Amino acid sequence: MAKSNGRRKRRDIFDERMLIVPFGIMFGIWIVAAVAWSQQADRLLVAFLIYIGLFIGAGIGTYIALDQNRRELGRRLIMLMMGGLLLVVALFSDHGNMQIEGLFWAFLAGIGPYILLHYALAKIVGPLIFGRIWCGWACWFGMIFNLLPHQHSRFRLPAPWGWLRYLHFIASFVLVAILWLAFNYNGALGRNGLIWFVSGLLLYYVVGIGLALIMRDNRAFCKYLCPISVPMKVTSRFALVKVAGNQDADCANCNVCVEMCPMNIDIPKYIKNGERVLSTECTLCLTCINLCPD
């Protein structure tokens, strides 16, 4: 009972100073948007910057202000906002195929600057700072998988199954290389890029939803098959921002964080060793922090 009361009290703590960072970032991005507008930059880019600023300020700010037991719902709504916007922009901006194959074509052909920029910022450089935050807060696949009924898996397949995503990554690159070198086919931009992008989206959604229902795990596709996570796992290993815990916490008789973690990470193992959560599977969803009684 004491723990329950302490936990309830902790949820009611809110300090307005916690909003300084998200709103500061929001206004900073809006200043960049204003400068871009004054330089007659792409209107879509300006609108995108305004929305991103609003997402960080209002979205993350609201998440911080929420009672802790409502934050998971808040995160899912934010993910729908962010992932939905990015998907709409990707589909209708004519900036190229944002599937992993689009990156390979853009790299081989030296075209598609928006494709290269997207992957550089969100999947390579970004994870050096925030880890796999894309997977937990902005992924247009994850936002749909979050709506399925199996939020928390009770088990995870043995480690070798995780190598399927690396095989998927390699197979995608080999396929693109063959189509590019042997048939001069480019699926990065234009009509080919759009067809490939939409086809890939539908395939990933069908496979991801199917795996989630069969394995009773919403994030099964993310854990075993998603090739987009491959570069993020490499750089997120060195992320500056990671989940940390209290080494003095009574983790031995709890394990609620392990039971509720969507990626099945053994969080207490790191806490007991006085380490931050070093697993490259962490998507920084913060479920563990919001549920921890300590």
Image (tube, helix red, strand yellow):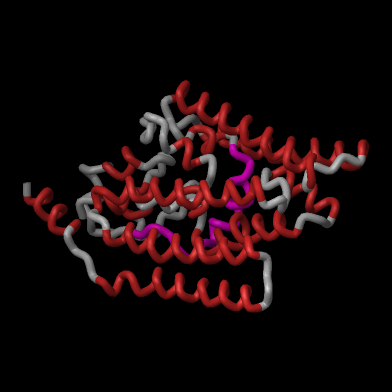
* Residue 67 coordinates in the image, percent (x, y): 23, 54
The reply, left or right, for residue 100 in relation to residue 110 is left
Q: How many marks?
A: 0
Give the camera-side residue of 183 and 259: 183
Residue extending farthest to the top is 214
Give the camera-side residue of 184 and 90: 90
* Residue 185 coordinates in the image, percent (x, y): 87, 40
Q: Is residue 264 at all visible to an observer of this figure?
A: yes
From the viewer's perspective, is residue 144 above or below residue 85?
above
Question: Residue 240 in magenta?
Answer: yes
Residue at horizontal 63 percent and vertical 78 percent from the top:
38
Residue at horizontal 24 percent and vertical 48 percent from the top:
69
Residue at horizontal 36 percent and vertical 30 percent from the top:
154
From the viewer's perspective, is residue 127 above or below residue 226?
below
Residue at horizontal 47 percent and vertical 21 percent from the top:
214
Residue extending farthest to the left is 1
Q: Is residue 282 at all visible to an observer of this figure?
A: no
Task: Indicate the quadrant where residue 16 lies.
Answer: bottom left
* Magenta residues (range): 226-244
Q: Which quarter of the rendering shows the C terminus?
A: bottom left
Give the camera-side residue of 103 and 97: 97
Question: Residue 36 in magenta?
Answer: no
* Residue 217 coordinates in the image, percent (x, y): 43, 30
* Residue 180 coordinates in the image, percent (x, y): 87, 42
The reply, left or right, for residue 3 in relation to residue 158 is left
